[in-house]
Image: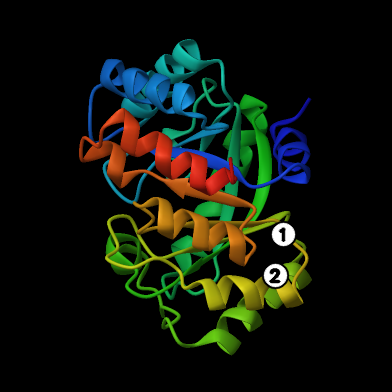
Amino acid sequence: MTVKQYMLDKIKNGTMHAALIDPDKQPAEKAAEMAKTMKEAGTDIIFVGGSSGITKENLSATAKAVKEATGLPVVLFGGTPDSLNKELDAVLFMQIVNATDPVFITFGQVAAAPIMAKLGLESISMGYVIVEPGMTVAKVTKAKVVKQDEIETAVAYAMACKMFGFDIIYFEAGSGADRPVPPAMIKAIKTYVDLPLIIGGGIRTPEAAAAAREAGADIIVTGTMLEKGASVEEIKAVISAAKGN
């Protein structure tokens, strides 16, 4: 089964939870411990990557350690062409549609494509939209962020993503954001666009996770709370709320 099909099958039965682990933030052994904790708490898939500091060495070591510790699919979310490696199960092959730096719109993807083909990595095409406050990823990509109250703009981006033919869409407030993508925006996107929708950034409480799920998110991502040393009980509560358990 492909990772894409695994994800589609999961969201047929409700909202998925994805744990995001940044290989630049800790050694691979620590990442494996974090991933194991997340699996025990109920996460369904592991995203690895980040906006900066990703290398072939730290990404490969992290992906291998996480996969061995959990048995869950390990998917690249954010990296560079030269960091691609055979330890990954799939790549979220993204276009950051509101970036203004062309590296994140086309040039980076062109560089990555032949490497992915050579390695035989599964590609899951994804339209990625950065929402206010945007955080580091907005700065790195020079994004024209969608403001929290720009609901129509968000829907327009989602519609464009569908017309481009992406498999999934991801609306991101940024790692460590002080507020997540607003539920009203999530609901509007799902009203007009029938693509699987991933929501990430700023989701650190059960209330925020439940709000995103109830608004229509298909996959909810958390990462910073794990990095900040949240307790197992806190992690379980957020994942449970994200999945509606």
In the image, residue 200 above or below residue 40: below
Q: Is residue 114 left or right of residue 159?
A: left
Q: Nearer the viewer, residue 82 or 199?
A: 199
Question: Where is residue 152, by image quadrant?
Answer: bottom right
Task: Look at the image and tell me in which quarter the C terminus lies.
Answer: top right
Q: Is residue 162 left or right of residue 174?
A: right
Give percent across and percent down for residue 56: 38, 29
**Residue that mark 1 sits on:** 166
What residue appears at the point 55 percent right and 77 percent down from the top-left corner? 185
Question: Where is residue 126, by image quadrant?
Answer: bottom right
In the image, residue 98 above or below residue 118: below
What residue appears at the point 57 percent right and 22 percent down from the top-left corner? 72
How many numbered marks does the figure carry? 2
Give percent across and percent down for residue 98: 49, 75
Asked whether the viewer can see residue 22, the reply is no
**Residue that mark 2 sits on:** 190
Q: Is residue 114 left or right of residue 88?
A: right
Task: Look at the image and tell me in which quarter the N terminus lies.
Answer: top right
Q: Nearer the viewer, residue 233 or 42?
A: 233
Q: Amino acid at mark 2?
A: Lys
